[in-house]
């Protein structure tokens, strides 16, 4: 039978050995929960999330007009123009806010100096929102040119999984590049 002291010793050794990883997981989970709670209220919705959604819709509208899909934009809604009956509303879950929170909280949880990670956080955030714009643009084009069933597949399945994979890939890329900065390399060699 394993003694209680022996079990506590194993737990203590485990916590000591994986302290950095445990800190990452705890900070990440708490950060995501707090951030989701913070943006899921009326004030944040009206003053933060909705303006972001309108900005994303505005950019998508301008790009669509340039690439030959005339439309009008009002708030978070796009409407086809010149005989195109397609209408699309960009809602809260389509604006990239929740995915951005996950990405940014993962960076917050990394145990590195802020001055080193803030640039990579900004780069990843910007890159992610470019991908989200591609999502909105492609969905409008698909809705215009293809069936509702095709639109539903790309909206509900393809882009959901693609955004998750892109969020993870962008985080891994930025974190890997961050870990190769000179200061991080120096700390590794000192250990």
Image (cartoon, helix red, strand yellow):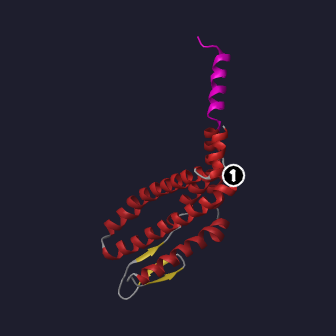
Q: Main secondary structure of the magenta part?
A: helix
Find residue 160 and report its image quarter. bottom left
48, above or below 40, in the image: below
Find residue 132 and report its horizontal and vertical position in percent.
48, 66
Q: Residue at x 40, y 64 (%)?
A: 155
Q: Residue furthest bottom?
A: 82
Q: Residues within 10 Å of mark 1 (few under 14, many from 20)?
A: few
Image mark count? 1
Residue at point 43%, 79% (across, down): 64
User: Residue 30's x, y, as percent?
Assistant: 65, 47
Q: Is residue 35 or residue 105 the one in the foreground?
A: 105
Q: Compare residues 123 and 182 and report the one nearer the observer.
A: 182
* Residue picked out by circle 1: 113
Can residue 95 be seen here? The reply is no
In the image: residue 62, left or right of residue 109: left
Q: Is residue 65 above or below residue 177?
A: below
Tell me where residue 190 appears, x and y as whole percent.
67, 40
Q: Quadrant of the C terminus?
A: top right
Q: Is residue 135 left or right of residue 101?
A: left
Residue at x 66%, y 31% (from the top left corner): 16
């Amino acid at each position: 039978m394993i003694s209680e002291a022996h079990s506590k010793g194993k737990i203590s050794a485990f916590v000591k050995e994986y302290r950095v990883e445990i800190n990452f997981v705890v900070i990440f989970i708490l950060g995501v929960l707090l951030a989701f709670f913070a943006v899921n209220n009326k004030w944040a919705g009206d003053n933060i999330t909705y303006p972001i959604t309108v900005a994303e819709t505005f950019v998508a509208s301008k790009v669509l007009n340039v690439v030959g899909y005339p439309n009008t934009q009002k708030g978070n809604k796009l409407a086809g123009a010149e005989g195109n009956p397609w209408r699309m509303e960009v809602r809260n879950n389509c604006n990239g806010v929740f995915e951005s929170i996950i990405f940014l909280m993962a960076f917050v949880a990394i145990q590195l100096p802020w001055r080193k990670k803030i640039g990579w956080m900004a780069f990843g955030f910007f890159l992610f929102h470019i991908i989200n714009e591609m999502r909105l643009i492609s969905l409008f084009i698909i809705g215009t040119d293809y069936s509702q069933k095709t639109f539903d597949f790309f909206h509900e399945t393809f882009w959901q999984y693609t955004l998750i994979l892109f969020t993870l890939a962008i985080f891994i890329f930025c974190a890997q590049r961050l870990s190769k900065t000179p200061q991080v390399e120096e700390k590794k060699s000192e250990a």
